[in-house]
Each structure stands twice: as structure tokens, then as C-alpha cells.
Image (spheres, grey):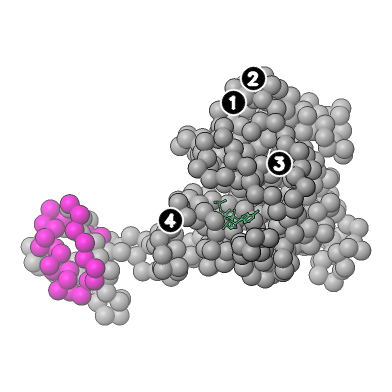
Amino acid sequence: MEELSAAEPDPDPRPARQPERGRERGRVQERGPDRTPEPGRAAEADRRPKADRTPEADRTPEADPRPAATVAADEPVIATRALTKRYRGGQLAVDGLDLTVPAGSVFGFLGPNGSGKTTTIRMLMGLIEPTSGTARVLGRPMPRAARTVLPEVGALIEGPALYGFLSGRDNLMRYDAADPTADPRTRRARVAAALDRVGLTAAAGKKARAYSLGMKQRLGLAAALLRPRRLLVLDEPTNGLDPQGMREIRALVRELARDGTTVFLSSHLLDEIEQVCTHAAVMARGRLITQGPVADLAAGLRGRLVVTTPDAGEAARVLKEQGVGDVVVTGDRVTGEPPEPDRRDLADLNAALVAAGVRVRGFGVERASLEEAFVALTGEGFDVAG
Ligand SMILES: Nc1ncnc2c1ncn2[C@@H]1O[C@H](COP(=O)(O)OP(=O)(O)OP(=O)(O)O)[C@@H](O)[C@H]1O
């Protein structure tokens, strides 16, 4: 959809599909002028020295006139407590969610289709009211503090709403002009900097309808970056992109994070989370399964023993004899569950293989993947078809 859509009166509108994006899944066109934080709108970032800023906790948020940017440095950028959404039809989409997104993290919000990711994001952005529970973004309660919080947040929820008949540059000029706090005298420079940031300078004069999906996503990011943001919320930012487009968006996200912006991105792609994120939360059927640093999520799991050998059959026999479980032979690879470290040393396993005349080319333990962690935690596969 290229045109800005008008706000829908229904507080829980169920999404229209976006045919041009070729998505398999329907979603709301969130970026209507009244419904989504305008990418071009932002308040001045707080420039007071840190020492002048006091923690939020002892203040009444409503009575507090300070901008959201004064949130204490160690306070989570997003914190929800028992956040719950039951849609009018009775569907429990989000069930008692306690989410903590640390400042400075690239936080992956992972879950199969229908697990409640978009519903959570819509509550965080103040687009829909929770049924119960609370959500704080940049230290302020949402949706109550949306007016002060949203200017600090750049959001790309589904594809960006663009005017196809305008060039990329003119689309950004429009977004910037919609920001009452944006100085028109510096508009051109701001737009040029944002285009440069996302690598669209060369294509800035082209009409947006001629942009590839990846270019449209980048233009959406540029719109979100017209002003400095403390938090970027990206809903499935690489969905529908080709591998090159995915790489570009991921590189951009990493770069933004290096500059100190907290990035909250939803995805149903496990490897994307592993590649880009420092932290992650895993959702299934509206409930939080786990959250924490990505490195820790799979660390609790034992990896799989992998032996590469031209003598796979013999190796499998020896490994079973040595107490290795679930031995699987695939070509010249033999894998299995290593015995508990206190029962058998890996060096002894290797020695046993060699003693039996197995020619070992490779021997090691492969780290468990996030996917294995997910399967272990939920007892079910990570089925993206939901
Ligand atoms: N407006 C609505 N009215 C009724 N049910 C809804 C509405 N929006 C979402 N749901 C339901 O709530 C559940 C969670 O949906 P949600 O879109 O939040 O999940 P998701 O993890 O973002 O999935 P996807 O990636 O497929 O969008 C699903 O069962 C969905 O059908």
C-alpha cells in the first residue's frame, strides 16, 4: 500500500493485507497519520547533562513535565508487567507478558505467526489499549504518555506508507514537514542526512513506486531517523526482502545500535535474531517463554557431538558403545548427544574412535542453536506457518 491510510475508528481493527508486498500473512497498515507515531515527528532529545536527570521511579508520570528522554540510564527502555490483550472476539493474543528491554540492546522479539508480537508492539506504541497489565516505554506509561514518548521513538510497523508518485526525497520532505517541531530552514539538510544514512542518496530523485521492497524499507527507516531517536521499533523489518535486502537492513540495524539507539525488532526468523540481536524474548501462543541475552538462551543446552569421518558406520557403533545417545549418520557426518561430562570425557570418546581404527577428520561439539532452545523450551517446533 503506498498511500497513507486514514485512521480506522475501530480500536481493534484487524488488518487488511498488503498485496504489493506479497506477504503470506495479513497485517494492519499501521502507519496512518493518526494511528502510528509519525516517523517525521520527534521532540528535541534531552541535552541536559546526565547528572541533572533524576530517576523516574519516585515521580508521578502524569504530573511530570520532563521529556521522556530523561529516563534514567539504567532503567529499561521497555518494561511491561502482566501485559494482557484479549480481543473483542475473545482471542487472548497476549497473556501476562513481563518484558524487559535493556537500554542499548538490539532486542529481538521472536515468535511464530500468531504468537502475539504485533499485538504487543501495538500496545507498546499506544495504538491499542491493553485489557490489563501495564507497559512503560522510555520510563513512561503507555498509552497514557504517548504524546511525550512517541516523538522519541522511531517506528517501522509493517511497510512504510509512502506516496508512490513522489520521489524518495520528497516523501521524506513530507514526513519532516508533518513534524511541527522540525525547523523548515534545516529540512533539506536533515532529509539529505537521513537519505545518506540508509544509502539512498543516489536513488533519492526516483519515484517511490519504482523502489524495490528493500529500498522502500530503507526509506521507511530514513523517515524514522529524521530526528535522533532513543528507541527504534521495527516490526519484521526484513519480511519479504531478498537475501541482499535482508543483509542491508541488518547491517543498518547494527550500525544504528552502535550509535547507542536501542532497537526492538520483531521477527519470526531465528537466524536473524542470532545474527543481529544482543538480547531476545521468545513468545509462543501469547506467552513469554524466555528472555535474556541471546548468548545465554541456548547456552543452557548441551550441544551435539559431531564427528566427520569416512568410516561413519564404524564410528556410529563405537560412539553408541561409549554411551553417546541419539546417534545419527548423514554421509560422512555422525552426530549424537554427548554423554554427561562427569560420566565420559570427550577426549576419551575421540581416543576410543581412533583405537577402533576410525579415521577421524573432524571432532567437536556444535553449539545448540536458538531453534533447538526454542524446541527444548516449548516442546514443539518453530513452525513459521503458525
Ligand atoms: N484485531 C484482532 N481481532 C481479533 N483477533 C486478533 C486481532 N489481531 C490479532 N488477533 C489474534 O491474536 C493472535 C496474535 O496475533 P498477532 O498478530 O499479535 O501475532 P504475531 O505474533 O504478530 O503474528 P504475525 O507475525 O502472524 O502477525 C492471533 O491469534 C491473531 O489471530
Label 4 sits on residue = 383
Mark in the foreground, 2 or 3 = 3
- The span shown in magenta is 306-331
Q: Are marks 2 and 1 in contact (CB under 8 Å)?
A: yes
> Could you say which quadrant of the image residue 68 lies in?
bottom right
Identity of the amino acid at label 3?
A: Arg
Which mark sits nearer the N-terminus, 4 or 1? 1
CB within 8 Å, label 2 to label 4: no
- Tell me the CA gap for discs 3 and 1: 18 Å
Per the image, label 4 sits on a secondary structure element best described as loop
Magenta span has 13? Answer: no
Looking at the image, is mark 3 or mark 1 earlier in the sequence?
A: 3
Label 2 and label 4: CA atoms lie apart by: 39 Å
Dot 1 alpha-carbon crowd within 10 angstroms: few under 14, some 14 to 19, many 20 or more: some
Disc 1 residue type (three-letter): Tyr
Q: CA distance from mark 2 to mark 3?
A: 22 Å
Residue position marked by numbered label 3 in the rendering: 31
Earlier in the chain: of badge 2 and badge 1, it is: 2
Residue located at (54% from left, 56% from top): 114
Q: Residue 329 lies in magenta, yes or no? A: yes
Label 2 environment density (alpha carbons within 10 Å; few <14, some 14–19, many ≥20):
some
**Alpha-carbon distance for marks 4 and 1?**
31 Å
Labels 2 & 3 near each other (Cβ < 8 A): no
Residue type pointed to by label 2: Lys
Quarter placement of the N terminus: top right
CB of residue at label 3: within 8 Å of ligand 1?
no
Mark found first going from the N terminus, 2 or 3: 3
Q: Amino acid at mark 4?
A: Asp
Residue topped by disc 1 = 211
Q: Residue at x 47, y 35 (%)?
A: 242
